[in-house]
Amino acid sequence: MKVKVFEFNPIAVNTYVLHDKTGECVIVDPACFYPDEERALFNYIVDKKLVVKHVLNTHLHFDHVFGVNFIKKQFDVDMQAHKDDQFLIDSFDEQMLMFGFSSNGYKPTVGKYIDENDVIEFGNQKLSIMHVPGHSPGSIVFYNKEENCVISGDVLFNGSIGRTDLLQGNHNQLIEGIKTKLMVLPEKTIVYPGHGPATSIGREAKSNPFF
């Protein structure tokens, strides 16, 4: 499986396009904000002749959903996310204003709720879902066992964890979820976070200061 990463918008969010030899793909956290970022994501998908099967969001903080409506318009695929983060969409204007952005009427929509009992399939790939709240109530992680990788969103970073001082964040809940659901994965599991460089479960188990 190919993992293509883009760094988008003023908050430097990682948007991932996952695809394999079948040409089917998923987009995780479409966060393109500027027109040139939209073009970069669109052109990659078109140039690779990819078919977008799913648009997945690890959580619904504003910086991770900037490109949702653009992708919907271009490829007619709805966003999927956890229901516990719906309140963040409902209060989207407030989110934007809190961080100095103007919403200009922009508000993404969730087409389908997903949870950790669901499996996302595309091409020859399967992504299992782990619900790891704490950064936000609906934070989820996508795990590909065969490819030995996780898309962790803002749950786990290289040398850090997601902040828990935002609305309905919970530090103890986040730590517990990481320990019981992520740190039990094989050490060589690659972690693709929502911001910053990739890491591995083994590296974080040994050197992350939060554990």
Image (spheres, rainbow, N blue to C red):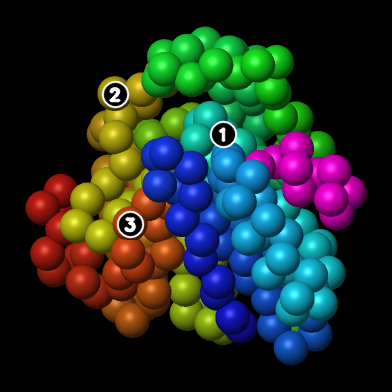
Q: Residues within 10 Å of mark 3 (few under 14, many from 20)?
A: some
Name the residue: 15% across, 53% down.
Answer: 211
On the question of residue 161 being in view, the answer is yes
Whether residue 181 sits left or right of residue 111 in the image: it is left
In the rendered view of the protein, which quadrant contains the N terminus? bottom right
Which of 11 and 172 lies nearest the eye of the viewer?
A: 11
Question: Does 197 appear above or below 169?
Answer: below
Secondary structure of the residue carrying tag 2 is loop
Q: Main secondary structure of the magenta part?
A: helix
Please rate how many residues cluster around mark 2, counting C-alpha atoms within 10 Å: few if below 14, some from 14 to 19, many from 20.
Answer: few
From what the image shows, is residue 4 above or below residue 139? below
Q: Is residue 75 magenta?
A: yes
In terms of depth relative to the viewer, which is nearer, 67 or 24?
A: 67
Q: Position of residue 7 (x, y in %)?
A: 46, 56
Earlier in the chain: of badge 2 and badge 3, it is 2
Say what amino acid the circle numbered 2 marks.
Answer: Asp
Which region shows up in magenta?
67-78
Residue 117 in sight here: no
Q: Which residue is mark 2?
A: 165
